[in-house]
């Protein structure tokens, strides 16, 4: 039996995926084989269905290859989500996609830990390259 989606549309599902955002800039990496973790505790966006604000922390972990992300550009990029209607899952996956396209890291993991709303909190994790769970 197919469950009702209670008014969620394809427009809701795709919201925010193609919105222009500030570019992520990089600088040349000088050393191989180390990890970087960046924590951004002031993430906010808009729920595309309810239009209510969402808040959370975005954590990006990566091993640079030839480039590292420039932190001011990352800050401007993340803060641009403030007025974007996008679901948590889409935001985390878009951040990963845009980050990988800019930096071309050896690997990267983006985790979004979102504050409780309606008694529920969510943690979304996306990784590059994609691997099966338990791998």
Image: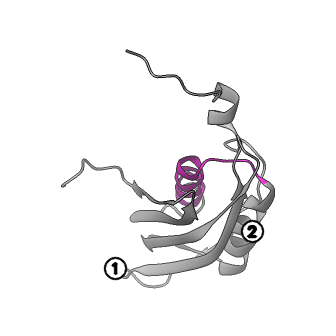
Side of 107 relative to 43 (left or right): left
Looking at the image, the residue that sits furthest to the front is: 119
* Image position, residue 19 (x, y; %): 76, 45
Looking at the image, the residue that sits furthest to the top is: 1
* Residue in the foreground of this view, choosing between 128 and 86: 86
> Mark 1 or mark 2: which is in front?
2
Q: Is residue 14 above or below residue 118?
A: above
Q: Is residue 114 above or below residue 1?
A: below
For the C terminus, the quadrant is: bottom left
Residue 96 lies in magenta, yes or no? Answer: yes
User: Which residue carries the number 1 mark?
Assistant: 33
The secondary element bearing badge 2 is classed as: helix
Looking at the image, the residue that sits furthest to the left is: 134
Residue 20 lies in magenta, yes or no? Answer: no
Residue at 52 percent of width and 49 percent of height: 89
Q: Earlier in the sequence, mark 1 or mark 2?
A: 1
* Image position, residue 114 (x, y; %): 54, 64
Disc 1 residue crowd, few under 14, some 14–19, many 20+, Cα 10 Å:
few
User: Which residue carries the number 2 mark?
Assistant: 79
Please tell me in which quadrant of the rendered image residue 9 appears. Answer: top right
* Image position, residue 12 (x, y; %): 67, 34
Label disc, if present, on residue 86 of the rendered structure: none
Residue at 60 percent of width and 28 percent of height: 6
Q: Is residue 94 above or below residue 29?
A: above
Q: How many numbered discs?
A: 2
Q: Which residues are magenta?
A: 84-100
């Amino acid at each position: 039996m197919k469950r009702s989606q209670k008014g969620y549309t394809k427009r809701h599902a795709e919201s925010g995926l193609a919105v222009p955002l500030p570019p992520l800039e990089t600088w040349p990496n000088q050393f191989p084989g180390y990890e970087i973790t960046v924590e951004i505790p002031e993430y906010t966006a808009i729920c595309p269905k309810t239009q209510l604000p969402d808040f959370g922390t975005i954590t990006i972990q990566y091993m640079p290859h030839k480039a590292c992300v420039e932190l001011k550009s990352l800050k401007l990029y993340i803060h641009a989500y403030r007025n974007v209607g996008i679901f948590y899952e889409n935001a985390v996956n878009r951040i990963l996609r845009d980050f990988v396209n800019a930096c071309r890291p050896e690997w990267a993991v983006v985790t979004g830990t979102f504050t409780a709303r309606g008694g529920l909190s969510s943690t979304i994790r996306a990784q590059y390259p994609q691997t099966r769970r338990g791998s």
